[in-house]
Structures are given as structure tokens and as C-alpha cells.
Amino acid sequence: MKDSEDWNRARMRKHIETILVGEGFLWISGLQAYALKGNTLWQLELHWANSRLKGKTSIMLIMKLAWNAFIYMIWRERNKRHFKGLQANESEDWLDIDFGIAEGVDFIAISFVKSAEVINHLKSYIAARACGSEIAVIAKMESVDSLKNLEEIIQASDGAMVARGDLGAQIPLEQVPSAQQKIVQLCRQLNKPVIVASQLLESMIEYPTPTRAEVADVSEAVRQRADALMLSGESAMGQYPEKALAVLRSVSVRIEKWWREEKCHEAMELPDVGTLFADSISEEICNSAAKIANNLEADALFVYTKTGLMASLLSRCRPDCPIFAFTTTTSVRRRLNLQWGLIPFRLSFYDDMDANLNKTFSLLKARGMIKSGDLVIAVSDMLQSIQVMNVP
């Protein structure tokens, strides 16, 4: 009996590649039925009163029973994941969150967010469990409810992830690219990091090279100026995880280089995000510094920041040159790794700004990241200033 089940599953798997994500597919063999929805395969148990029915009538009855069971299972899964919300998650989820807090993780991502309330609830829980914790909450945008309440969710969160696999099962496939671009742009406007994830190099789970379409997909995410791209199955269970990462990096570097060479800057309205007067000053300084760096074709931007705010504001401007961010706090340095164009370092600051500059010049020259004569633009949230200089 087990051999028969394995054979049926093997036949089912052969058909999966031809099914578009988001479609439902039903497979019936004898008294067994299998159903595919998204990336989930269920074996359905069929029961009917009159087993003596034969021919077309029997087949239609089996199909009706199987399809009804299939629809119910999808409904049950969606109810479990969407409608209960974080407040009613399984106890295992809270144990996982507690484990992350105890281990000092930098980010916790929450799936199927439908409102800002869920984000605020999780933040309150983290704050109560770990006083003074700086764990950031990432909202995974993968449902219709997420798109309906997009701006309030992003405002409440510390970043967002475009989880295209589940999102493609929730909305028509042809709407996924525009939804991705909308999320990426809104995150940049609100100064929140955004990750594009799911099926970037899916074929590299089994093959050492990607398809041309996958390379074009990665290129589009880079051109949209997403902060980060994330591999899933390619690195978690794929046969070529290192090659997949190398491809992702090489394509991203090449597209960014082309973007700078061709000056393909797209004008984007960046609204003010500062609520305090001091934050508004930092915002204006960073906007001006990025513009000066592009106009003078500077080799690097330096930012000295204790909280990470000025570094994120510079990243938001997407300047042509790399941004070296220096901070005194390890947790801030780790979080800044997620943001576009930032190369963060942790080091102690002197009271004298010239001493800080000389210290960082020596550090980066020793690593081959800058050289004498390079033009550098430096900003600091301690002095609220812009300095233009050449590396000695």
C-alpha cells in the first residue's frame, strides 16, 4: 500500500512544475486524492455512502467530495493564519519569540500581518519581556489585508518584507509585480528597510545556474532600490546554496554599477519623516550631503551616529557612493547591515571630530576601502554638520 502511495505522490510531483502559484490542482488515483494549493500538497481522505457507484458517476462524486474537502482545508488554513492574529497564536509561537528575545536577535518577522495593531502588540510584548531591548519587528506583506492597510502597517513596523510566494497565492499573479514596487517605494518614503523575498532563484534549488527570467527578476528588485534580497529554499535546502548567493550578489553588483554609470536616477518624492525639530535638521543635512556627494562624484560618505538615524536617512537618499556608518553600539551596527548601501562599523568616538576622522581614515585605508586623495563627505549627529575633505 505504501509503494502505491509513494508512486502516486511521485506522479503528483511531476505535475507541480506546470501549475502556477495560486492555482488549485486536484489529483485523483483510485481511492486516494491529492490537492495542491500554492506550495502545499495535501492527501485527502474520501468517504462516500454508496461504494457500488461506477463509471462517470463515481468519478464525478469522488471529484466533488475531494474538491469540497480541498476547499475546506484551504479555508481552515487561512482562518488559522489570518483571522486569529498574533494575539491568538499557538503557544509555540510565543515560545519561539521568547527564545529570540533571550538570544538577543536583531529582528523578529511576523507573518500575515493584517493591521498595525498586531505589530504594536508584538512590540509591547517584547518591551515587557526585555526592558531596553532594541529588537526590530519586520512585517511580512503576504495577504490582501496587508495591502489594504499597507501604510499603517509599515508606519508601525521597523521594516517590511515582500513575501511574494504567499502574496501570489492571495492576489492575482499579474498584480504581484506592481504590489512589490508599491511596497518598496512606500518603505523608502517612510524610511523603513524593505526585503524582497521568495523564489528569486528558485531553480537553483536543483540546478547550478539560474534561469534568465530569474536573473531579470533579481535585476528588477535591485532597480526598484530594495534594501535587501533574501534567499529561502535556495539556501535552506538547495543543492547549491553558495552558488545561489554568489549569483544574487554578482547580479546585484552589476545592476547597481550600471545604474550609477548610466545615472539612472528616478525622481522620487521623499516626504519629511522627522517628528522632532532635531530629527528634521538631521533629515535636511542628510538630503544635502547625498546631493553634494552625487554632484561632486564623491568616493564615500561617512556618517558618525549613535542611534543609527542619520545613517538610515542617508541610505534613504540612495547616493551613488558607499556609505560608511560608524556607531558606538553593537546592536545598532548589526541592524544597519540591513539597510541599502550601508557598511557599518562599531568603534568608540572621541570628543574631537578631527580625531574621529583620522581614526576612521586609518581603519578604512588599512582595509583597502579608501585611499589617499579620495573625496569624502562626512556628517555627524553629534555636531549636526557637513564636512567635505580629501583623504590624507
Image (spheres, rainbow, N blue to C red):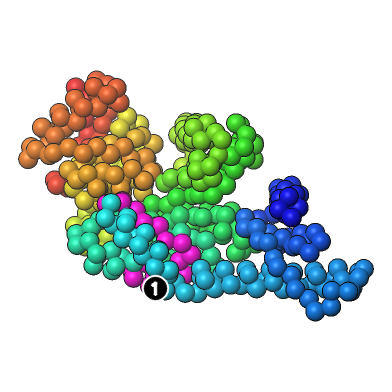
Q: Amino acid at mark 1?
A: Gln
Residue beneath the point at 58% across and 72% down: 76
Check disc 1 and report the residue beneath it: 87
- Tag 1 secondary structure: helix
- Residue 389 colored magenta? no
The picture quadrant where one finds residue 26 is bottom right
> Picture coordinates of residue 345 (x, y %)?
24, 37
Q: Is 384 left, or right, of 17 in this rendering?
A: left
Q: Nearer the viewer, residue 70 or 124?
A: 70
**Relative to residue 336, is residue 69 depicted above or below?**
below
Spot occupied by residue 166 in the image (x, y as percentages of width and height):
56, 59
Residue extent of the magenta highlight: 104-121
Question: Quarter-wise, where is residue 22 in the image?
Answer: bottom right
Q: In this view, which residue lies farthest toward the front?
A: 1
User: What x and y, as percent, mark residue 368?
Assistant: 29, 22
**Mark 1 surroundings within 10 Å by alpha-carbon count, few (fewer than 14), some (14 through 19), many (20 or more):** few
Q: In terms of depth relative to the viewer, which is nearer, 211 or 68?
A: 68
Residue 273, quarter of the rendered image:
bottom left
How many numbered tags mark residues here? 1
Image quarter of the N terminus:
bottom right
Q: Position of residue 28 (x, y in %)?
A: 79, 61
Q: In the displayed structure, would residue 3 be above or below residue 256?
A: below
Q: Nearer the viewer, residue 18 or 314?
A: 18
- For the C terminus, the quadrant is top left
The residue depicted at 30 percent of the width and 48 percent of the height is 335
Is residue 223 something that shows in the picture? no
Left or right of 339 on screen, residue 112? right
Q: What residue is drawn where x is 42% and y is 70%?
A: 89
Relative to 89, say whether 185 is above or below: above
Left or right: 70 with respect to 199? right
